[in-house]
Amino acid sequence: MNTSLLNPFNIIYPTAVQASLPSQCSLARFDRSGRFVVAGRSDGSAAIWDLETRSSVRWLEGHVKGITSVDWSRNSRFVLTSSKDWNVIVWDLASDIDPPQRKTTIRFDAPASSASFHPRNSQIILALLQSGDAYLVDLRKKHRGRVELEEVQDDSDDESGASPRSAMTVAQFDPTGRHIFVGTSTGSVLVFNTRTKTMVARHKIAGAGVMKGLDFAKSGRRLVTNSSDRTLRQFTLPTYSPPNADREYMEQELEPTHKFSDPINRIAWHAMSFSPDGEWLAGGAADPASHKIYIWDIANDGQLASTLDGGREPLLYVHWHPSKPSIVSTTNHGNILIWHCPAPERWGAFAGGFEEVDENVEYEEREDEFDIEDENVLAERKMKQEEEEVDVLTGKDAEEEVVDHPRVNGDEDDFAWADDEPDEDTREWKMKIMMEDESDMI
Amino acid sequence: MSHESTTATAGATRTEDAPAPVPNYQPHLILSGHRKSISSVKFSPDGNLLASAGALFGTRLTGDIVQTLSGHSEGISDIAWSAHSDYIASASDDKTVRIWSLDILRGHTNFVFCVNYNPRSNLLVSGGFDETVRVWDVARGKSLKVLPAHSDPVTAVSFSHDGTLIVSCAMDGLIRIWDADSGQCLKTLVDDDNPVCSHVLFSPNSKYVLASTQDSTIRLWNYQTSRCVKTYTGHTNATYSLVAAFSTTGGQYIVSGSEDARIYIWDLQSRRVVQTLEGHKGGQCTAHPTRKLIASASMEKDLTIRLWLWSDE
């Protein structure tokens, strides 16, 4: 609502630290509304921070070992945490107790290194284990099951049969949820169809080494990878055909459109995140002595636009706000830094009818500007103007329009499958306000 | 109840050409119990309760007093419901805001005159005679922001439906729109004559603000263009801070009390007075969120609250 009144000429990436939240956490992610941040700690607990009040509103206590990843459902009702204690927990923030009720606990037979919700249905969960296996867990009644994602080996290898399967090191849904992207220890990206769990493509990425991270632009057409060669690569993704009965898959080497690296210090990257419009990329540097976030301008040929300096506490994680020029980053001292773009104060706004101008404007007086008009005529004109109908009711949700991705042939099945048995994550859910005790207030 | 809900939907789906239904509100209940004048009445968002400054009434049942909330040492000027209908915040001349029945927010240095929740109810905004607007963290009872908002007592503050904007008005006659996140002033609306502004709120879709001024006028402003798009007159308002409200259950109306002991109902679009409710010395009034019901409270003398129900006969 406020966007229409804000200055549209502000810089569109954050430039300064707005707040530091002491949370003892190692990773932090915005929810899809940008109102909350979930912070995962290495002692196994997680905290939900309310950014409007800058205070923690919920403690998620359930894991006994460090948290490895956190994720939000579409409308922020459910939070997913994965941990080294072999468990993945789904928390329900609509429950009116603190710590909130667990909706589900999924137990694996190895430490979980990441877990994420399907973008359209929080009952479909992708989990990656430290053993290098990825599982798709479906909690819906009709589809209940746990399927391991298996890489299809080349036919030529059939003879030997001994070629060791490469371990999966990262796994993520694309923004539509149609495909799962998996990075491997041998530097390739595998693409699976979520519905059929079959592999539809394998992309070899030359020189990448072990894949360490994936992130998508909101449109889902562009992918950025982080790998052990200390380079971030951006790719434009091809269109994947729906899986066919013969289990054919696309074997294609992808050529990066941009490569981002630090040519001087050759630092590695802990995390990266696209801006909401996909025109900027933030990279969190794995520098042991400083907190640096690099911002690249993708629209401008991938040039380095700015380096944000967040002090001496080394950086661990970076995530961009879903709609604003704001970034959340974490330090290894456990602080969450909220970056924003400070807006200059507009003093002209305090005076009604005034407007600030940057340059002198030659004012041209209208011919009839100081003519004295008949009051009746004026009143009549005003009456006429006010005849115009006004709409005071509709347009409430116009700003929260659902991002619908361009439909490609064969998508319908995938979307219908994911929307079957929808979850309880409706937009109307409300988080109960927990009052603190009066005793520690006065 | 079922009878009412069918007519409510009929009112909402009327076509453009059909004449707007003429409201026909009739006296429904008289609630008594107050011993001092009533400065504010508000329906809870779920419509089950009516709060009046000083006491809490149940409206669905019989109009009995459910609970009396006492604690402020001076008079109460305004009350507000949280979105879940579970808390009430009150603004008082004892310079505090209380959240019933839990918190007391201290910080204002003079009478607190108005208070409102944001849609998620994690923030409260209040304004008072110390000329500031304060934003509070509800859960912790702490002041988050102090906006040096006006140069005269602040008479009303309220959030937009999505919580990103705050509108405030004051006796200096200015209406200001603020960014809730940064606390920056985004816009100031002012009428040529600069009349004392007594109440302001956002329209249900937050594209307009409705402001009552003490020159017996209610104006609907398009704050994007800083233009007044509708003017409602006919009532009397020169002394008290009277509240105007949107009533959208039977059609689209503006409802306001008046100092001539009536409640006025205007058609939102045509700006004509379509009904006046007489019978008691009305002052404050409010419209029910879902039913065709209006509550009014008297400023003086008879100290009652009346409920008016749309009668279809």
Image (spheres, coloured by chain):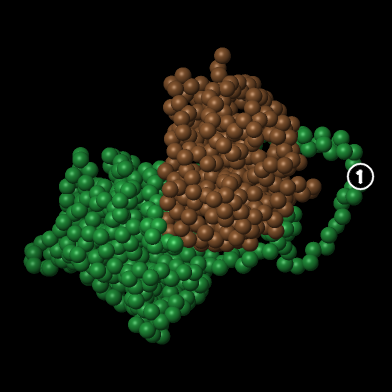
Chain colours: A green, B brown
Of residues B124 and A249, the one drawn nearer to the viewer in this rendering: B124
Q: Which quadrant of the view contains residue B23?
A: top right
- Horizontally, residue A382 falls left or right of residue A424, namely right
Image coordinates of residue B280 in percent, x first then y, are 64, 27
Q: Residues within 10 Å of mark 1 (few under 14, many from 20)?
A: few
- Horizontally, residue B234 falls left or right of residue A210, namely right
Residue A411 visible (yes or no)? no
SS assignment at label 1: loop
Of residues B63 and A393, the one drawn nearer to the viewer in this rendering: B63
The chain letter for the residue carrying disc 1 is A
- Residue extending farthest top: B313
User: Considering the image in quadrants, where does the N terminus of chain B appear?
Assistant: top left
Image coordinates of residue B28 in percent, x first then y, are 54, 23
Query: Residue placed at 72% from the left, 67% from the top?
Result: A358
Label 1: which residue?
Answer: A372
Query: Residue placed at 72% from the left, 58% from the top?
Result: A351
- Horizontally, residue B221 falls left or right of residue A290, namely right
> Taking B28 as reference, is A373 above or below it?
below
Image coordinates of residue A4 in percent, x first then y, are 60, 53
- Residue extending farthest bottom: A264
Of residues A285 and A77, the one drawn nearer to the viewer in this rendering: A77
Image coordinates of residue B282 in percent, x first then y, are 64, 32
Residue B98 visible (yes or no)? yes
User: Considering the image in quadrants, where does the C terminus of chain B appear?
Assistant: top right
> Taking B82 as reference, is B245 above or below it?
above
- State how many labels appear: 1
Query: Residue placed at 50% from the left, 28% from the top?
Result: B291
Query: Residue placed at 87% from the left, 50% from the top?
Result: A369
* Amino acid identity at mark 1: Ile
Q: Which quadrant of the view contains residue A360?
A: bottom right
